[in-house]
Image: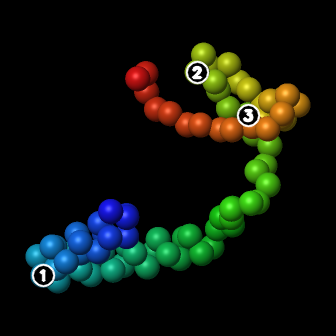
Amino acid sequence: MTLKARIDEYKQKSAGKATPEMVEIMTRCKAELQETISSRSIPQVGDAMPSFSLPDSNGNNVSSQTLLESGPLVVSFFRGMW
């Protein structure tokens, strides 16, 4: 099931359960979020990524420029100590 389908299903199940106050808050927050997103420069698929430096899994800072000297770069984010 796609994310859109799941969201649509959730909307159908929750329709009519929110109070008018909740609907007003959600509507206002959605508008604020859309305004924030539209005012930012969001990278698009195929855009060049800016140079960056991030800590690796050992806590050592690693530069994207240094890694690119060895070839293509794949960036993967993970959280915690799994």
Q: Which residue is mark 1?
A: 16
Residue at the spot of label 2: 57
Q: Nearer the viewer, residue 3 or 79?
A: 3
Lateral position of residue 46 relative to residue 30, left or right:
right
**Contact (CB < 8 A) between labels 1 and 3?**
no
The amino acid pointed to by label 3 is Ser
Q: Residue at x 65, y 26 (%)?
A: 55
Query: Residue 34: x percent and y percent?
Result: 50, 75
Of callouts 2 and 1, the N-terminal one: 1
**In the rendered image, the vertical position of residue 58 relative to residue 52, given as above or below:** above
Which residue occupies the foreground of this view, 24 or 45? 45
Rendering quarter of residue 62 = top right
Which element is circle 3 on? strand
Q: Is residue 80 above or below residue 77?
A: above
CA separation in Å, label 3 and label 2? 13 Å
Q: Which mark is residue 46?
A: none
Query: What percent of the width, then of the height, locates residue 29?
Result: 38, 73
Residue type at numbered disc 2 = Ser
The answer to whether one can see residue 29 in this image is yes
Q: CA distance from mark 1 to mark 3?
A: 48 Å
Q: Quadrant of the C terminus?
A: top left
68 versus 51 height, above or below: above
x, y percent for residue 76: 59, 37
Q: Residue at x 12, y 81 (%)?
A: 16
Q: Report the mark closest to the observer, 3 or 2.
A: 2
